[in-house]
Image: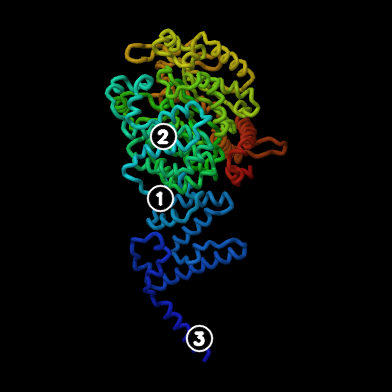
Amino acid sequence: MVGFVFITYEVLSLNKLLQIDTQALHQEKLKSYVYVRTGSLSPSEYQGITYKARKEIHKAVRRILETEAKIFRRPFNEQFSTFDGEDHECALWLLLKRCQSEDKAIRLQAVQDLASNSHWHDYQYGTVAQTCDQRTAIGLARSKDIDLRFFLPPPPLPKIKTDYPIEDELRLLLVSLPQTGLDPCVQYFTSLALRESSQTLAAQRGGLWCFGGNGLPYCETLSKIPSETVELFCLQALVQHSKISSHCDKIEAKGGLQLLQRIYQLRKDSAKIQRNIIRIIGNMALDERLHSSIVRAGWVSVLAEVMKSPHIIQSSHASRALANLDRDTVKEKYPDGVYVLHPQYRSSQPIRADILFVHGLLGAAFKTWRQQDIDRHLDKKASGGEEGYIQCWPKTWLASDCPSLRIISVEYDTHLSDWKAKCPVEAHRKSIAFRSSELLDKLKAAGIGDRPLVWVSHSMGGLLVKRMLVDASKNPEMDKIVNNTRGIIFYSVPHHGSQLAEYSVNARYLLFPSVEVKELSTDSPALKELNDDFLSFAKDKKFSVLSFAETLPTHIGSMIKLHVVPVESADIGIGDLIPVDVNHLNICKPKKKDAFLYQRTLKFIQDVLAQELCGGQVVCELSEMMFHLICTVAPKSKIDGKGGLKGQSGVTVLVFLAATATMYSIAVTCASWCQPEHLAGNEKFFIW
């Protein structure tokens, strides 16, 4: 009787289990809450016992998560309360939960695992975008080759009146910011942007503006400046304001993030406008209090998209902004004008050293370090190469050859003539001494000095490097920068003055030479004092110096050819000096990757950072070679009663003994760089 009742119960239970629930909307309610799954299920997914059993397993997983939360007294994520998804969806939700773990290692690994998924359905990416927290979204944006479906689009912006131009909104934002006690450049750009109209700006275009490089014909024929140009002036003013933390608060409070988002969407075809906007976001991201506002305004998805840009300047601006937002893996902060060329994404590979690039007169953080401007079609045809033109060789070539380096490039304004100055400021602010103080503070914030460091400089940038090192040696707070300097590369640095300065001074009434140019004069007391101070400072320091000197004249305009930095001026008196048959502009621009300029630069960096770069690679390879040698010799040798080796020639015995001593030395050295299992995990090594 009992057996009959049991069999009846099992039959009824099985019959109930085999009934298929036709309430599809109920089954799919979790997935259709925000995102609708467009693809239909295949028969194998909704028919038979397998599908029903899978559902039961998922319910069991949910109960396990609930039990875990109760046992460990952790809050249970309510998003799992109705969870009844498929196996891959279970993995998705588990990853999302791990992304919010208090354990940093678990959290970072979960973000990495999440970012590696590239074959999901749209609704699954949408689920992550809708569910993940701010920290996870930023981590995903800084993951290489990330799928942009992981991010929500920027939120809809409020409608504005059609007769209310964007430039007026920008002016209102500028007017709302503090106008007193400002830096002269901030005042200048703000007053420039706050003109009454485009027509007024056009009227002001004469005089100083024409000498700013716009050309007299343009000034005479221009009757009205386009709205896009006015917006650019306003954005340049906002860039200056965004360098002031208290002004960033005002910009956010006045809806500046949303206004910038609107302009960014409207000016998709203007690289300059978009670059200035992202620069502002990067400056605001220095203040951690504004991170939530930046994320809510939709900037993470925008920055993630720009990171994929083939234009290095655009992607580097976005990389800087995201690095300033990412407080989970980046402890440094990158102020305005400090750009990380590598690594721009999150990476598990440790950074062993820093390379810092400092441009010279009229240079920039990216264009100074591009490949040499040549007829690329003819050069490609002659060499048979397929590699395209390199916009920035430190980012492309050096990062590939030395992936464990952090490569940083800095930018600052310089001018040949005060007629062409972007901002009329006090003379002392353009001096090398002032720029040194300003840059040192920025570099300290960026973590320069925490690792071994190599400086790479061109022209006036080399003088700035010398001034920074001399100044840092006198400041206890900057000791690390001095002590961790391993080497300096000078590309045509005018240690003893430049002929360009002499020419400009002789034509002073026409060219109105800038402070920067005047400081390069051969009779400049400041230049001589700087060189003497640096040589005195360098005597007691253990860093290497490599100098390149140009031997060809440079075309200055269409009429003048000038040997900007003669070989004798490029000779600092210490280290190696290498003359190269190029002009002043191309001395820091290699023709190709196998060119002498790049290969010699690479060798210098690898030599001075040999311990940092090769510790985990070359030393381990050497130990492996020695290990194979010992395994070849040792089995053929037997120890006699007198402690000697039998059956081997004297040479073989000496080789074995030398290998033994070398192996021991390398093993000790390798211990801190190699994985333990590299040697210790080998049974033959223990026997030996």
**Local crowd at mark 2 within 10 Å, few (<14), some, or many (≥20)?**
many
Mark 2 and mark 3 lie on one chain; the one further toward the N terminus is 3
Amino acid beneath label 1: Pro
Query: Residue at horizontal 59%, vertical 28%?
Result: 481
Mark 3 residue crowding within 10 angstroms, few (<14) / some (14–19) / many (20+): few
Q: Nearer the viewer, residue 153 or 468?
A: 153
- Amino acid type, label 2: Leu
Image-based side of 625 in relation to 540, left or right: left
On the image, numbered disc 2 is attached to which residue?
235
The nearer-to-camera label among 3 and 1 is 1
Disc 3: which residue: 6
The residue to which callout 1 is attached is 155
**Left or right of residue 367, residue 434 in this image:** right
Q: Nearer the viewer, residue 243 or 395?
A: 243
Q: CA distance from mark 3 to mark 1?
A: 59 Å
Q: Is residue 611 above or below residue 679?
A: above
In the displayed image of the protein, which residue is found farthest to the left?
221
Q: Which residue is at the far bottom? A: 1
Q: Amino acid at mark 3?
A: Phe
Q: Is residue 603 above or below residue 348?
A: above
SS at badge 1: loop
Q: Earlier in the sequence, mark 1 or mark 2?
A: 1
Which of 359 and 543 lies nearest the eye of the viewer? 359
For the residue pair 660 and 413, the one nearer the viewer reads as: 413
User: Which residue is drawn at the image coordinates 47% and 52% (left, top)?
Assistant: 114
Q: Secondary structure at mark 2?
A: helix
